[in-house]
Image (cartoon, rainbow, N blue to C red):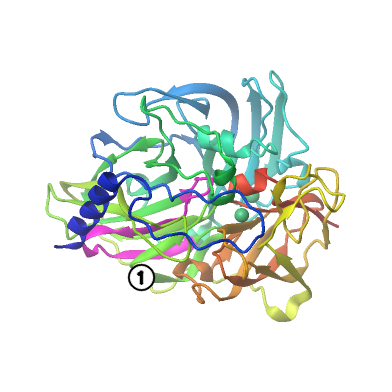
Amino acid sequence: MNRRDALRSITLTAGVAGVGGLLPALSSCAHETHAPQSAPVLLLEPSFDRALPILPSAPPTLTLSAASATTSIRKGALSPSMSYGGNIYGPTIDVAMNDAVAVRLVNNLSVDTNIHWHGLAVPADMDGHPSRVAAPGSSIPYAFVIQQRACHAWYHSHVHGETGRQVTMGLAGSVLVRDAAEAALGLPTGVDEVVLMIQDKRLDMAGHQTYAPSASDIMNGHLGNHCTVNGMIGPVLATSRGWKRLRIVNASTARVFNLGMSDGIPMVVIGSDGGLLGAPQATRDVLLSPGERLDVLIDLSSLPAGGNAFLETRPFGGSATQGTNGVRVLRFDATAELGPSFTVPAALVPQPPISEEQAVRVRTFDIANIHDGGHDGHAGHGSMGHTINGIRYRMERTDIEVEANSVERWVFDNTKGTEVHPMHVHGAFMRILQRTGGRGTLATHEGGIKDTVLCMPGERVEVLVAIERHRGMYLLHCHQIEHSDDGMMLNMEVR
Ligand code: C2O
Ligand code: CU
Ligand code: CU
């Protein structure tokens, strides 16, 4: 049985046994009281029957109208969604170094919304802090200048307590930042460069996406039963036989993907959250957690005309609730046409110097604890809540003070934790130093500049944090959005 058949049979067996029927008993949680852990939610294998929607490009001056919409996530069904002007999600905003961005967010929803520019270094009052939201019928003008290296940033709503729902429904989009160093590499471009917004969705029998996290979803994540790309289950991209550049963002609230190519198709990681790596890294598969981006080259030149290959997410270990099965995510159908000839450059771009000697202080963040939010005078009403260092988010409180243009050494400690926490910082970029416990190693894309880092159960991750130049209030939070909506977030003031 080859691997593809093995994947199919895993899916089939899971379907017969029902959700959780195959899975080992979950290890009991270290906390004294906690919401019950439910069985993992398995992803269902799609049938591939519709063309991949390509997210439209937009210039940096535009209006984004957040509105309710409908979209066809599953073939033959229309689902409720939210969008910035389309059926789901927003356009891919194309910008270059020194470009002025002027985006007017118009709120045509019946609830508050705002926009956070995840991965862009912007002034604090432009960053989408949850204290600044547009009420229904009102708008927010976002204006800032791009001053950072080429990267794949993204934007999404950041209304405290509602981020998970709004991002899941579709209030998210990509930003591609370009620069001369990237252009000099001659990477695949035009139709050979594709933004893939990957998001798991929980669909009901009618094919409608739902978002109503239960107590156990707030612990384990609101995991979907389907994987979508650009808002669609089982998409197909007809493409020439050659190299492709995939600009992937995991827009799920909680699901971690283990992405790889079928049939031994070569896959080369060239970048992550904060831009290109120093050198390309060939890989078989890569764990990508919510909020992270992956810039990857794949080589389809060995496919025969009419042949196909799949981007898939594979099973992985380390968590009781995630990675329990694998499915195919996106099919590439090879046309007769040959793609432009391309050789992966031996070196990419020099990395910004962020060194250990620059670190002016060390901070440790205990991310393993779920506290009774009511006992310490902080927010909470005697209910369980997600915390960082035992503190639950409160809008008006400053939790961390850091200096503009400084470097700190941070430790995210999930050693005693049982949950998956992708930790994300606004107004700063990270370089990952080491991971101990759990996987005990860094993944291929983690050698680059990051803004989000995955901390699996049992892991302790040390990073250098380079604080950006803008002063004001930013955030540090878990990008497992059920956790951040539940309070796993701190205010960070840059002084
Ligand atoms: Cu993508 Cu504060 O988040
Ligand atoms: Cu962010
Ligand atoms: Cu978390």
* Position in image of residue 204 (x %, y %): 40, 30
Q: Is residue 493 left or right of residue 86?
A: right
Residue that label 1 marks? 282
Q: Is residue 241 visible?
A: no
Q: Is residue 283 above or below residue 491?
A: below
Residue 229 position in % (x across, y down): 38, 42
In the shown orientation, is residue 290 left or right of residue 344?
right
Q: Is residue 434 magenta?
A: no
Quadrant of the rendered image containing residue 25:
bottom left
Task: Tell whether 475 sits left or right of 179.
Answer: right
Q: Residue at x 16, y 56 (%)?
A: 303
Q: Position of residue 212 (x, y in %)?
A: 55, 33
Would you say residue 87 is visible in this rendering? Answer: yes
Point out residue 352 in the picture as x, y percentages from the top left corner: 62, 69
**Residue ID at (70%, 48%):** 384
Work out whether 362 lies above or below 41: below
Q: Which residues are magenta?
A: 249-271
In front here: 35 or 130?
35
Indicate the amino acid at tag 1. Answer: Ala
Q: Secondary structure at mark 1?
A: strand
* Nearest to the observer: residue 340 or residue 404: 404
Identify the image quadrant of residue 485. top right
What residue do we see at 72% from left, 65% from top?
A: 365
